[in-house]
Amino acid sequence: MKNISLILFCFLSSFGSARETGARYLIITHDNYFNAIKPLAEWKTQKGCKAKIVKLSEIGSDSTQIRNYIVNAYTNWEIKPEYLLFVGNKNQLPFPRMGFAGHDYYYSDNYYTNVTGDFRNEIIPGRLWVFDSIQAKTIVAKILGYERNPYLADPLWFKKGTTIVNVDDYPPYSDSVYWADTKFVQDLMINAGFVKIDSFSDIYGNSSIDVVNAINNGRTFIIYRGVGVQTWDYPFNDIDPDDMHNGFKLPVVISATCATVEGIGYRWLNAGTPEEPKGTIGFFGTTTVLEHAAELRSAVAKGTIQAIFRDSLVTLGKAAEAGRLYYYNLFGNTLEYNGWTCLGDPEMNLWTTTPRSIQVLYTNAWINDTYTVYVKYSSQPVESALVCIKAFYDSTKYFYKRTDGNGKATFIGNLYHPDSATLTVTGRNLLTFFDTVIGGYNNGPFMIYHKHLILDTIGGNGNYQPNNGENIELAVWIRNIGNSTAYGVTGILQKAESDNYYQISDTIKSFGNIQSSDSAFTSEDGFNISIHPDCPDSHMIRLKLTMKDTNNTTWISYFNFLVYSPRPYLIYKSCVINDSLGGNGNDQINPGETIELGVWLQNIGDSMAENVIAVLQKQTPDSFFTLDDTIKYFGTILPQDSAGTGADGYNISVDSFCPDQHLIQLQIKISDSLDSLWIYNFSLKNYAPDLVFKNYYVDESLKYINPGDTASLSVLIKNSGSATAQNIVGHLTSPDTFLTVISDSCYYGDILPDSTAGNQVAALLIFAHPDAPPGYLTNLKLRLDGVFYHDTINFSIYIGQRDYLIWDPDPNHSSGFIIHQKLLSIGYSGNYSQTFPSDYLNIYKSLFVTCGMPPSKFIININSPVVPEILDFLNDGGKMYLEGGDVWYYDPLYQNGYNFCPLFCITPVLSSIGYFTGIAGNDSTFTQSMSFNYSGETNSMDRINPAGNGVLIFKNRYNNNGCGVAANHRTVGVSFEFGGLVDSLPPSTKLILADSLMRYFGILPSTGIAEQNDVVFMPNNQILEVCPNPFRNRTIIRYTIQDTRYRIQDTRCMIQDGKQYPS
């Protein structure tokens, strides 16, 4: 009987789900990210950590339902989960809140992975904190690139690390702990053979830019010690992922400070795109905010890093868990054990040196009931390499094992033809190895095609490639994947399909006897194939190999190869801009120029290109440039040679109004004598000046001109473009009747890119009309003309000062807008802003700053750029009101806040004002008789007393502890919130208090009628109180007779308008 077997070599990869026996790697994902996370699950399964993905819609979306599913999996699955990856942010997949006695609550995924309820994580957790599917795909691409195909173009980046110490600026000082931690880390890295270890610190002058540069240069680990919440503290607080360009040189960050998981943690991890990765690959940090916790964070950080370098724990998650346990063993509690969260893939293998290429010894067919793989490096066995064999079709054929001390992994089982499997080997600091294993046959011999070799040394050019016109010897190997010897094997080669581009001769070859698992080949005298001279490039030759033995058993295999036909292949190579005749000779494209564009072509093909012609045209219609002399002849170009237009290139004329960075989009069509056509698009960039308004000054320093004054005006112009603005002249006009331009011409000269210039030679002079309203904003136009440049910029200046500015950085904005409303209602002119108006303070007579109450407050840092501007404002005679619960005592002492106390004549006493029932004004001050109940966010406020010329104006009604001080009619500082005051009877209203503050500063309303808070004492123990008085729209009159012996008779009231006419 004749037996015929057909073998088609087509390997298909799929991720089949096995029967529900469990998984070592459990992924719980928000439904939106299911497709994005599948490639990661496929990779984990392929490498030997079988993965399973479940969606929230399948198991429930609240934390209890999720935990119940996890507990059931760990308790009942045959294969228990060892790693657990959550995919989604806390609003999509709950991030459970946990607590610890005596501390604020915090968040932790340990709620899910502490399955047995003791404290330990029985499953190792990790989380991808993503907000959309692009971020999920990005992190998956980064993990696959980091673990499966690490970046090897720079082999030293794997041996570089960074430590950062940000010293404490206030007690308790923990610097010694920070420095000891980084020394510990550096010693481990040195012992691991690291070639570069940054030791950054603020005291060394380092800052965010140094960290960004290190990341872009390539670092495997970054460790931070210091303070911070959401981000690291200044000067390491501005590490923006937009500035990172590190590709696949991705670091793991250990952030040993307060609560940076929900901040830089996920921002850095999510950075980049699937095509352009950047940022970090893992982040281990906290969700807790603690004081006096340096030693606690030290334990977790040191335990993690020593697990990586000293204990050789391979995965990110296991190293993180080792750090948690190290902390627990030292302190015996779960505060920081549960306070640390791992962002990233918990099963991801970490690099601690340049990955090593391994030698894997194996047979490419699984024939017997066992299959053995050997793993070596430099001929020495590699222990603990993970070997995984995963069948393509039969999902039950899934094997994984660690190599033993001899580098050997032996699997018991079988894999039968036609199935095949992936063979994957991974390990600590080992480059991943991939190959395919073919299924065996256990019912006798079974022959298959194995490989082939092109021999063209006699009938061809000897490059071991099939080329058109060659006569080649095709040496072929066949393999016996059966379990017994095949005797007298012969092979017959035929065309698999009709094809006139080649012919076969010498088609029958003898292979002899072939034992099980062995192979044989034709010898160098192989099958003969003659390829036609006109065979096109990349033509596929498809072949059929029929094998027979002495028992007339027949096996058929199909295989193929490509023909490489020598031919010319022209590419656009480069271009050169020549503007020496039609421009300024700077070899750039600038507005108004006509350039010669020299173009070079290269022949990267295998034969010469003859009669080459190239035509230049626009990619799309574009009115900003025109083309001329667009056809050029390049002649004959030999293989690998280049040819250019020479000095007489294509002509491009650029419009004088062509904007900066505008792309001159060109297309070149190249043809030769064979009528081949190659089309390439390329672009040139126009470099133009772009002048924008930068700033202005009246009389060199002011931001306003007083009504009735004549003043000089300096206008600063910045060139934000990429080319020099040449010979710029300005002409100033004003369409406003309240402002007259007296001298309108100015000269700026040449303004380089990214530089700022002021008007030179002649000063601009302006006159403000005496009747201009106070704080009036008037518009001006400045026409700018230069060489190929014409534009008009618009800007505004103030006539007169405004009465006040409310700067409201308080996160809750509890007071600022209320003060603004009160002041507007009684005729004051001013502005409200939540951002600081840098360089514009002197527009205002007074500044009100509201910083809020703890814990939701704003801290004016000692190094903040607003501090010198505020100091200059006060030194120039400005008035200032400043409120905040911690501004005076707590922030300067503990939070690196600026100490305003000396400027405000304040002595800070304590961070608590004691039991608090409300505030009372002080006698003989403008707050006399005022008394307010208080409904603010918190009663936690600094206790303050006056110093020097300071006067106590507000105190705690309960214990008389101070909470408000005024000084020199220039400053008022309080530790409560204006917005928390509860109005009662006058003068205890916020309206009266707002007006009183301005009058204390000596500022009367710029518009409307001036109001005064008067209490008039009448004779005979009568009290008449009119407040406010004078008034606009509304006032309150209180008339009291304290002695009942007086008989109330007719009471009259006279009201006069602003012109003193009685009504």
Image (spheres, rainbow, N blue to C red):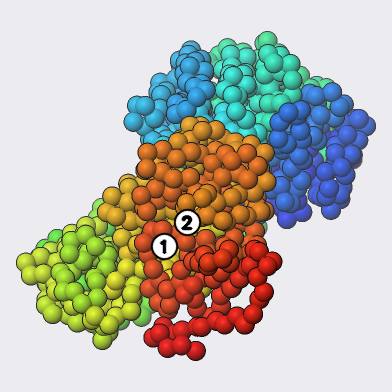
- Residue 955 at what x, y percent from top left? 56, 45
Label 1 sits on residue: 999
Residue at the image position 52 percent from the left and 18 percent from the top = 177
Residue at the image position 37 percent from the left and 27 percent from the top = 203
- Residue 378 at what x, y percent from top left? 53, 15
Q: Looking at the image, is 975 positioned above or below residue 1060? A: above
- Residue 202 at what x, y percent from top left? 39, 30
Mark closer to the chain start, 1 or 2: 2
Q: How many marks?
A: 2
Residue at the image position 55 percent from the left and 51 percent from the top = 921
Residue at the image position 34 percent from the left and 26 percent from the top = 204
Which picture quadrant has residue 234? Answer: top left
Question: Considering the numbered disc 2 on the image, is that residue within a helix, a strand or a loop?
Answer: loop
Dot 2 surroundings within 10 Å: few (below 14), some, or many (20 or more)? Answer: some
Most foreground residue, 557 or 879: 879
Residue type at mark 2?
Answer: Phe
Most foreground residue, 1041 or 794: 1041
Label 2 sits on residue: 926
Most foreground residue, 741 or 515: 741
- Residue 681 at what x, y percent from top left? 37, 66
**Do callouts 1 and 2 mark residues in contact (Cβ within 8 Å)?**
yes
Classify the position of the N terminus by image quarter: top right
Determine if residue 260 is in view: no
Dot 1 surroundings within 10 Å: few (below 14), some, or many (20 or more)? Answer: some
Q: Give the distance between the C-alpha atoms of the residues marked 1 and 2, in whole angstroms.
A: 9 Å
Question: Considering the numbered disc 1 on the image, is that residue within a helix, a strand or a loop?
Answer: helix
Horizontally, residue 339 falls left or right of residue 17, namely: left
